[in-house]
Amino acid sequence: MILIVGGAGYIGAHINKQLNLNGYETIVFDNLSYGHEDFIKWGTFERGDLGDVEDIRKIFEKYPITAVMHFAAFTFVGESVEDPQRYYKNNVCNTLNLLQVMLEFDVKKLVFSSTCATYGDPVEIPITEQHPQNPISPYGRGKLMVENVLSDYSRAYNLHYVSLRYFNAAGADPDADIGELHNPETHLIPLILDAASGCRDNIKIFGTDYNTPDGTCIRDYVHVTDLAHAHLKALQYLEDGGKSDYFNLGNGNGFSVNEVIEKSRKITGNDIKAIEEDRRPGDPPILVGSSDKIRKILGWEPKYDDLSLIIETAWKWHQKREK
Ligand code: UDP
């Protein structure tokens, strides 16, 4: 059985679906602090907290777990600057608790959610895995700390792990069973769709004076179903005896904030009012990752690597959610 820690969240829920479709049995472990109980439509749910080692032990005693996928983390970069302790405790210390129990029960396979935020301000685009890692926020630094812990644990305790450094996860399950939902919502596409459906008046464009073709930030949006598929590939790779490794997880294509808004206007058929605002602190102008390594070693191929598909699936889910 595969333990999905944080499986009630946006990304974890999509992976839970993907694993079940591929014949895996899953256990979702989540404290529901940010996760959604109604996203747990597959597998078995166990409510518990990574801050409590006993909570984790109970799960490992109860189920024959063979591998773990770990998504439980706080992800608001700005908040991590305001309250770093909250981020280091949850994202670093609690991960140490999970690793401790995994080792106690001799479970030595882990797929870990890392982030392109571990690179910091890019010195080269596209960003490859060799790019220096100089994170600029406590969120990015915490994720990098865990990457380093995993590397040490793999050497010392024979832990086998894959770290996936996500670029911008976006879109929704094409069947619209689950989708992107955060509280508070800070992500570009769901906010644009809120503006399209009239749930908010407008979308604010954070910075129009960047050194990019249209002056707005460029990001590499990767469809959450493709991202889920990469996790399945990573799990199969570990099951086949693959060595510990880390991979970028992006499409290798960049789209500007203006392009995303324009495409959303076409897809939704609605007028989306955009307001130019100041830059958001901490946003690099361009984040685009090279996906050569994951394509080559894990054989990952994105299916939804078209911005239209990303927005169309997100819109379908958004409309269903509002009904
Ligand atoms: N963004 C924006 N307005 C918003 C939210 C985001 O202009 O209301 C921009 C943000 O500055 C960044 C891009 O959209 O350049 C993607 O931001 P998001 O928060 O979705 O993801 P991040 O890149 O921070 O992981």
Image (cartoon, rainbow, N blue to C red):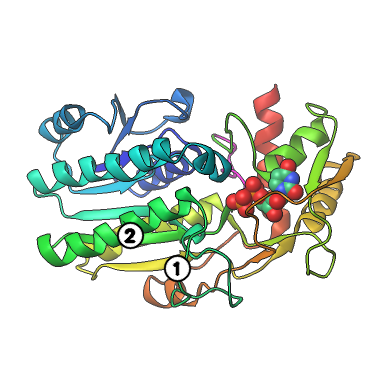
In the image, what residue occupies the spot 46% across and 36% down?
A: 9
Q: Where is residue 3 in the image (x, y as percent from the top left)?
A: 26, 41
Instruction: Name the magenta segment's main secondary structure.
Output: loop
> Tag 2 or tag 1, which sits nearer the N-term?
1
Mark yes or no: residue 1 visible.
Answer: no
Reading the image, the residue beneath label 1 is 133
Q: In this view, does 90 lie to the left or right of 322?
A: left
In the image, what residue occupies the spot 45% across and 68% down?
A: 133
Mark yes or no: residue 38 visible.
Answer: yes
Q: Give the range drawn in magenta.
A: 170-177
Name above or below for residue 227 compared with residue 241: above
Q: What residue type is labelled 2?
A: Glu
Q: In which quarter of the image is the N terminus?
A: top left
Reading the image, the residue beneath label 2 is 147
Q: Is residue 156 left or right of residue 228?
A: left
- Most foreground residue, 23 or 315: 315
Res. 303 mark: none
Would you say residue 174 sits in the magenta stretch? yes
